[in-house]
Image: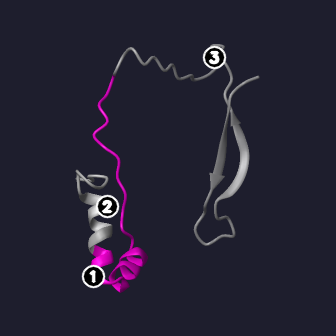
Amino acid sequence: MPATAAVYRTVRNTHERLTEKEPLVFQPPNGDGPSVLVDSRHAFQVIEGFGGAFTEAAADIFYKLPPDVRAEVLRAYFDSSSGNGCTL
């Protein structure tokens, strides 16, 4: 049975908010279309990092938190020894 991936879509100004769609079905390559080969023995690029964002809404809520809780959130996000260590 081929592997599948769940697909969810969100579209601005519509009713679609994390709406589940038809799953993506991975078929074995047969030469008729594009395919992706993953070989963990070879690295072709370096991942510089992963990140996140504070949106305007999140910043508004963040500002309403007590100062000690704001400091805790910042430590959890940016501190490399006791948090996630985000730097970019």
| Residue named by callout 1 | 67
| Three-letter residue code for mark 1 | Pro
Query: Residue at point 61% right, 60% down?
Result: 10
Q: Which residue is drawn at 66% across and 70% down?
A: 14
Q: Mark 2 points at which residue?
A: 76
Q: At label 2, which amino acid type do we have?
A: Ala
Residue 43 locus on image (x, y percent) = 34, 21
| Residue 29 marker | 3
- Which residue is at a point 62% across and 22% down the rendered structure image? 33
Left or right position of 88 against 23: left
Residue in front for this viewpoint, 1 or 83 = 83
Query: Dividing the picture into quarters, in which one does residue 64 lie?
Result: bottom left
Residue nearer the viewer, 11 or 79: 79
Q: In which quarter of the image is the N terminus?
A: top right
Q: Do tag 1 and tag 3 residues touch (Cβ < 8 Å)?
A: no
Rendered position, 30 above or below 3: above
What span is in magenta?
44-70
| Residue 77: percent from left, percent from top | 31, 60
Based on the displayed image, in which of its 4 quarters is residue 71 positioned? bottom left
